[in-house]
Image (cartoon, rainbow, N blue to C red):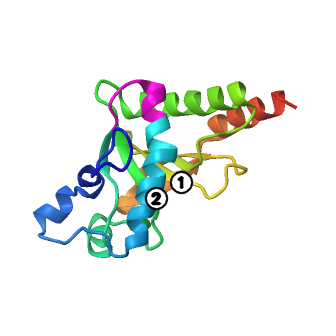
């Protein structure tokens, strides 16, 4: 089943971790599938259209057992179908992260406001980009960088330069 023009339910549910550990990874509630449809139509599809390149979902929806196994946080948007970890063939994760900023700032410059409801955009371990839904396009997206520190602990740092850039673009329109 298509969740949007270019994203399928199968790829949004696919999980190598679930397969490896024989864990179920299907919708725990019907509304999570509805969330995934909204997320794909409102966030991933516009991003894919902007890039004019295929976007690969490396982790979309996660059941609680899968989320626990991958070390996801208890309140992860993956659990409700409103987040995905993505890559684009031929791009490094950092290049994709930069392209997402450009996509969102172009969106603001073209329309005078943010049309893609992205809440958090996280460059994770220089390997993929996590993007999640925001209930309000009034809120600015938050750009962050995740890295591993001593003891295999993940540290999230706000990307001051990116967050400043998107605010400057918005202020320039006033």
Q: Classify the position of the C terminus by image quarter.
A: top right
Question: Mark 2 touching mark 1, by CB under 8 A?
Answer: yes
Q: Position of residue 140 (x, y in %)?
A: 68, 46
**Residue 6, quarter of picture:** top left
On the rendered structure, is 154 left or right of 152? right
For label 2, the crowd category at 10 Å Cα-Cα, with few meaning under 14, some 14 to 19 and many 20 or more, is many
On the rendered structure, is 15 left or right of 42? left
Where is 91 relative to 146, above or below? above
Q: Earlier in the sequence, mark 2 or mark 1?
A: 2
For label 1, the crowd category at 10 Å Cα-Cα, with few meaning under 14, some 14 to 19 and many 20 or more, is many
Q: Position of residue 3 (x, y in %)?
A: 36, 50
**Residue 165, quarter of picture:** top right
Disc 2 secondary structure class: loop
Which residue is identified by label 1?
133
Task: Give 6 or 94, whichever is nearer the viewer.
Answer: 6
On the rendered structure, is 145 left or right of 24? right
Where is 71 relative to 37, above or below? below
Q: Position of residue 170 (x, y in %)?
A: 77, 34
| Cα–Cα gap, marks 2 and 1 | 5 Å
Residue 83 belongs to magenta span: no
Residue 102 shows in the view: yes
**Residue 51, quarter of picture:** top left
On the rendered structure, is 167 left or right of 24? right
At 69% across and 25% down in the image, what residue appears?
110
Residue 78 shows in the view: no
Which residue is identified by label 2?
82
Q: What are the residue bounds of the magenta stretch?
A: 47-55
Task: Give 49 or 90, whichever is nearer the viewer.
Answer: 49
At 67% across and 49% down in the image, what residue appears?
137
Disc 1 secondary structure class: strand
Q: How many marks?
A: 2
At 32% across and 68% down in the image, what residue appears?
67
């Amino acid at each position: 089943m298509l969740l949007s023009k270019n994203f399928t339910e199968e790829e949004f549910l696919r999980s190598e971790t679930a397969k490896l550990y024989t864990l179920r990874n299907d919708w725990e509630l019907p509304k999570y599938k509805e969330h995934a449809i909204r997320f794909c139509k409102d966030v991933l599809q516009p991003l894919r259209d902007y890039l004019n390149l295929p976007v690969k979902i490396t982790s979309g929806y996660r059941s609680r057992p899968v989320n626990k196994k991958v070390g996801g946080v208890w309140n992860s948007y993956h659990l409700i179908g409103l987040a995905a970890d993505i890559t684009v063939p031929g791009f490094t994760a950092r290049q994709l992260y930069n392209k997402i900023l450009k996509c969102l700032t172009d969106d603001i410059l073209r329309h005078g406001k943010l049309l893609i409801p992205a809440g958090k955009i996280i460059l994770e371990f220089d390997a993929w980009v996590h993007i999640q839904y925001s209930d309000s396009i009034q809120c600015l997206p938050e750009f962050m960088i995740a890295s591993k520190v001593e003891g295999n602990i993940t540290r999230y740092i706000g990307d001051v330069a990116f967050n400043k850039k998107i605010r400057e673009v918005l202020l320039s329109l006033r």
